[in-house]
Amino acid sequence: MKTTFSNINNIAYEGPKSKNQLAFKHYNADEIVAGKTMREHLRFAVVYWHTFRGTGSDPFGAGTMQRPWDDGSNSISNAQNRARVAFEFISKLGAPYYCWHDRDVAPEGKNLKETNQNFDAVAKVLKEEQKRTGVKLLWGTTNAFSHPRFVHGASTSCNADVFAFAACQVKKAMEVTHELGGEGYTFWGGREGYMTLLNTDMKREQEHLAKFLHLAVAHKKAIGFKGQFYIEPKPKEPTKHQYDSDAAACLNFLREFDLLPHFKLNIETNHATLAGHTMQHELEVAGAANALGSIDANTGDELLGWDTDQFPTSIYLTTYTMLSVLKYGGFKTGGVNFDAKVRRESFEPIDLFYAHIGGMDAFARGLKIAAAIRKDGRLAEFVKNRYASWDSGIGAKIEAGKSSFNDLETYMLKKGEAAGSSSGRQEYLENLINEFI
Ligand code: XLS
Ligand code: NI
Ligand code: NI
């Protein structure tokens, strides 16, 4: 049978010496690294939105993507056919997972009822294709930001009917995720933020967001969905300020509204950099709070100030990412989700393969390098030794909560000076990392 990608074989591992751009040089799914296969460590997912719905349009020009299987219509049959093509792509690539927004997979109808029927009609094909190929759903999510009704946000809209509509959308998308055996469900703020504080009751909007998430938690329980809920931080774009601005802000919000037990974070590289942080910083903030759930793997451009969503190819980025992921015990329900799009100039279907293969190989290398750095042990030992003054004496006493300001004054009056700090050795440590890259 002739299929869309008939001319492309399943992408195989050929090793680092291969010159074949349609083969993996580092991602060897069954190879064991630090006690688990690479497949189990990395849990790669392909996103439906950029990969199958991205047109390549930008504020200055029309779409450029050549997608010969897509007739460009909003028909159900086009959506169903697109789903079959998507699964052919994902399975040829060898990614075990995919992710969607409700509106990526099926078009809106003339009202909520028709929209839900459209979604069911395409979800039926998704289910068949998951069964046929073994590709699984990492997480589902809702697009409650593209349609004009969400002009002022979804759950944080000033219009209560918009809150109600968004709730129906999340309800349905959660139910479809559950039906498809999805392992998680993501909440990204979309337009949950503000453009100007002059017209915004920020306190009330944040309370509505919390209310919305509590309703989602209750519905999760009601339908018996056991997947993990994620919040995906992003500081701006499309709004000037998004409420889920970075990992620390999300954790604070979740704690304030008693939601923390129900959520983990889905950290996206380009969102971290938009927030003025590194990916490593965001992963450490999430990990330290036992809330590191999943990652949206992409990268920004140092010279562009928006969410460019490029495929990750930097080995430093993937090494630092995997160092944090391994440190916090690896992915459980989450994975490496390529929330990334090919450039507008990379418009041929084959570019989708090059992009994903490159991202998967970059993460495979990052994983192997991070595992080697951990096995070597010098980095961890350096950090441990740096804090040695806390392991005994006054440090241990403070950590154990057994000292007061008065005690510390007595101690320091006797000692006279806090001397004895040693070098931070940043350059030495950077060189150490380079030994493994
Ligand atoms: C947008 C977000 C979005 C989420 C899913 O910047 O990254 O794609 O991952 O809604
Ligand atoms: Ni994302
Ligand atoms: Ni993003």
Image (tube, grey):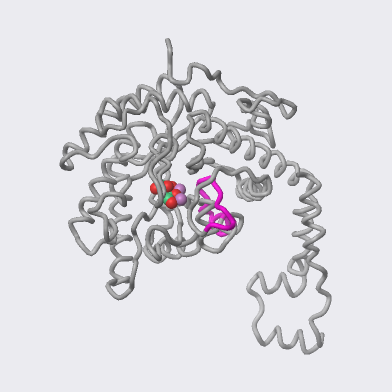
Residue 298 picture location, percent across and down: 54, 46
Of residues 187 and 107, which is closer to you in this image?
A: 107
Asked whether the viewer can see residue 229, the reply is no
Choose top left, top right, bottom left or bottom right for residue 302: bottom right
Identity of the residue drawn at 38% across and 23% down = 84
Identity of the residue drawn at 51% across and 23% down = 92
Tell me, yes or no, whether the highlighted magenta stretch contains residue 290: yes
Residue 38 picture location, percent across and down: 63, 32
Asked whether the viewer can see residue 11, the reply is yes
User: Residue placed farthest to the front in the image?
Assistant: 61
Q: Is residue 188 placed above or below 235 in the rendered structure?
A: above
Quadrant into which the N terminus falls: top left
Of residues 8 and 95, which is closer to you in this image?
A: 8
Residue 337 picture location, percent across and down: 50, 41
In this figure, what is the number of numbered marks? 0
Tell me, yes or no, whether the highlighted magenta stretch contains residue 116: no
Of residues 23 and 228, which is closer to you in this image?
A: 23
Identity of the residue drawn at 48% across and 61% down = 246
Q: Is residue 102 placed above or below 24 in the rendered structure?
A: below
Magenta stretch: give its range: 283-304
